[in-house]
Structures are given as C-alpha cells and as structure tokens.
Amino acid sequence: MAPTRMSRESLVPLLAAHVLQNGLAAASLRPLAKAAGTSDRMLIYHFGTKDALVAALLEYLAGMFAAALDTTFPKGRSASRRACAQTVYAITGEPQFAPFFRVWWDIVAGCSDDNAAYLDAAGGMMDVLLAWVVDHLPADDPDPQAGARAVLIVIEGAQMLRAVGRGDIAEAGLAALEGRPA
C-alpha cells in the first residue's frame, strides 16, 4: 500500500486536534508538525507561512464549532432571539465545547495585541458564527442580520462571564432578557 500523501486538507484536522487539546498559545511550528507526523518545513511548504497555517486552522475550527452546534442545537429555528442566545449559551456550557473556548480566548488575547493573523482569523470565525445564528433565528425575524449581531454579543458576553467564574451574572442577564427574575 502506498503511503498517504500529505496535503493541506489532510494536515488541518491533525493540527486542529492538537490545538484543541493543547491550546493555541502552544501552537508553534515544531509541536504542530510533530502532532501531524511531519516537519515544520513541510508545514511551511503546504501553507506558505505560519500566519497562513493559523488562518487555515482557525477557519477549520470555526467550521468544527458550527458543526458541533448543529449536532446539539434543537432541530428547527429558535422561537426568538432570546431563545437562540439562551440555547447556545446552555449548549456551549457542555464539556465538549470547553476546548473550543480555550482556543477562542487565546485568539481574543492575540487580537488584543493587534496580531494581524488572529484579527483576520477571528473576523472570519465571527462571520461563520453570524451566518450560523442567522440560520437559527425565527423565520419571521424582521432583521436577521441585526438579530444575529445582537445574539452574538449576548452569547460572547455571557461566555466571557462564565469563563471568569461569573456564570451567575451571565445567567441572570439572560433571564433578564426574557423579563423573568434570575
């Protein structure tokens, strides 16, 4: 049997598994190459630059995240923007989503340092998630684009609060959106 030829498409899932397990902060070329069973030079050959590798990797992770949401999100559209935000918040609190958020906070930290690769990748990831939210808002939402932005802001804020140990504030805020006491 001939050995499998490596390509960008075959490398990215291996790199993604490594990053989900170890975080993005530890994603230097040598450990990534080792995780993929190749050399750092071959990674550069396939991706051109480390920034291009990170961009491809983060695009893939965004797709994985959206697919994971699709498999756990109730079928059909949400009853309201609030219901969409609450459901996503509840689902993403499950343990299988923790590695994605560890990587996300690494990206946010890189963005706060004006890392161009992280800023570009984060923008692309947000575009994927905005499109996902649009597809899960009520069919009669008067402005799905604006609605998706509002839901994403709520979700991101709630996730940040949960990440810093203040999930109680996040849950109270989500409850307040519904007009019910926390």
Image: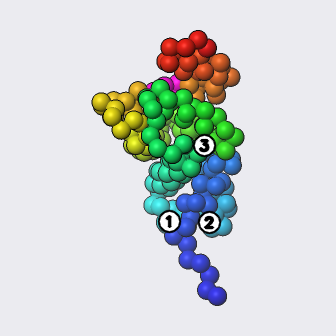
Report the disc number at residue 39.
2
* Mark toward the start of the polypeptide (1 vs 2): 1
* Mark toward the start of the polypeptide (3 vs 2): 2
The answer to whether mark 1 and mark 2 are in CB contact below 8 A is no
In the image, taking residue 148 as reference, residue 23 lies left or right, namely right
| Magenta-colored stretch includes residue 128 | no
Task: Give the mark count.
Answer: 3
In the image, which is nearer the foreground, mark 3 or mark 2?
A: 3
* Mark toward the start of the polypeptide (1 vs 3): 1
**Residue marked by disc 1:** 8
The amino acid at mark 3 is Phe
**Residue marked by disc 3:** 100
Q: Position of residue 91 (x, y in %)?
A: 60, 37
Quarter of the image for residue 81 reads top left
**Helix, strand or loop at mark 2:** loop
Mark 2 surroundings: few (<14), some (14-19) or many (≥20) residues within 10 A: some
Please state which of residues 10 and 33 is positioned toward the viewer in this rendering. Answer: 10
In the image, taking residue 37 as reference, residue 148 lies left or right, namely left
The amino acid at mark 1 is Arg
Q: Position of residue 97 (x, y in %)?
A: 63, 42
Marks 1 and 2, how far apart at CA? 13 Å
